Amino acid sequence: MILFASDLDNTLIFSYKKVNKEAICVEYLDEKPLSYMTTWAYSTLQNIEKQTIFVPITTRSLKQYNRIRLLEDKVPNYALVSNGGILLVDSEIDNTWYEESKRQIALTLPELYKAMGILKTDQNVTLEPRFVDDLFVFTKTSDTNATVKLLSETLDLTKVTIDLNEQKLYVLPKMLNKGVALERLKKKIESDLVISSGDSYFDVPMLMTADISIIPKENKIQEFLSSHPNIIVAKEEGMGFSDEILRIVTLYIEENNMKMA
């Protein structure tokens, strides 16, 4: 069976600010609509989930992920949240996985606590720093260059990475990435083919781990994937990217079914 591992934000789901097609809301916060899928993508994902091992892989915290409803009448059998540090099986935390993740990042904890201290005194920080799910540090800053410089001068960058997504700032253990998580999952779940899709630097390790990976056109991460033998650069971007991902996955499902017949 195919294992389809996909990022969520700006890959399968999109902020209400980016809706430009007929869409269905898949995430609410206090009854306020937050994220959408195109109506076609939502409908198609229901069929794909029945024919693949569909695994959302997201940097979102457990709490943030639990707001999302990707499937009509169930949850995905597997989901990786907090950049792969937490595995959900039928919506329940796999405690063995979680404890192993915490062991893997144990040597980086002094750097994460140091980052928390720096960010709490940085006047550019606009959101109280958070130690997300005991795995990594997250905040927002009004001056990304200044905050990154401050962290880079103090932290041991052989142990942690500093990542940005607009004004969002993350300090992550090197071992806490989507590629490591996908490799761990592949040992747990047998599959014939691994397809992944993503759009950001967080997704590069996962995309490099998969057999076939799909990215949007004119995306800055393409240069980091030049050595991958099977990268598909989509013709569409924005919400059209999600439609194209699922069209491609559907074609591989049909091809796989023909081989099995």
Image (cartoon, rainbow, N blue to C red):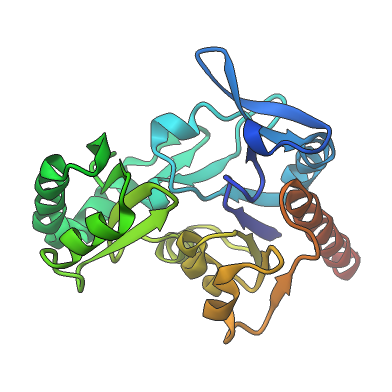
For the image, the number of numbered tags is 0
Q: Nearer the viewer, residue 254 or 179?
A: 179
The quadrant in which residue 134 appears is top left
In the rendered image, the quadrant that contains the N terminus is bottom right
Q: Nearer the viewer, residue 73 or 135?
A: 135
In the rendered image, the quadrant that contains the C terminus is bottom right
**Drawn side of residue 75 relative to residue 244, left or right:** left
Q: Compared with residue 219, is residue 15 higher up or lower down, i.e. above or below?
A: above
Q: Compared with residue 158, is residue 252 higher up or lower down, i.e. above or below?
A: above
Image location (x, y in percent) of residue 192: 68, 68
Q: Nearer the viewer, residue 249 or 244?
A: 244
In the rendered image, the residue lying farthest to the top is 31
Q: Compared with residue 155, is residue 42 higher up or lower down, i.e. above or below?
A: above
Image location (x, y in percent) of residue 121: 10, 42
Q: Nearer the viewer, residue 87 or 17?
A: 17
**Drawn side of residue 100 relative to residue 110, left or right:** right
Residue 131 visible in the picture:
no
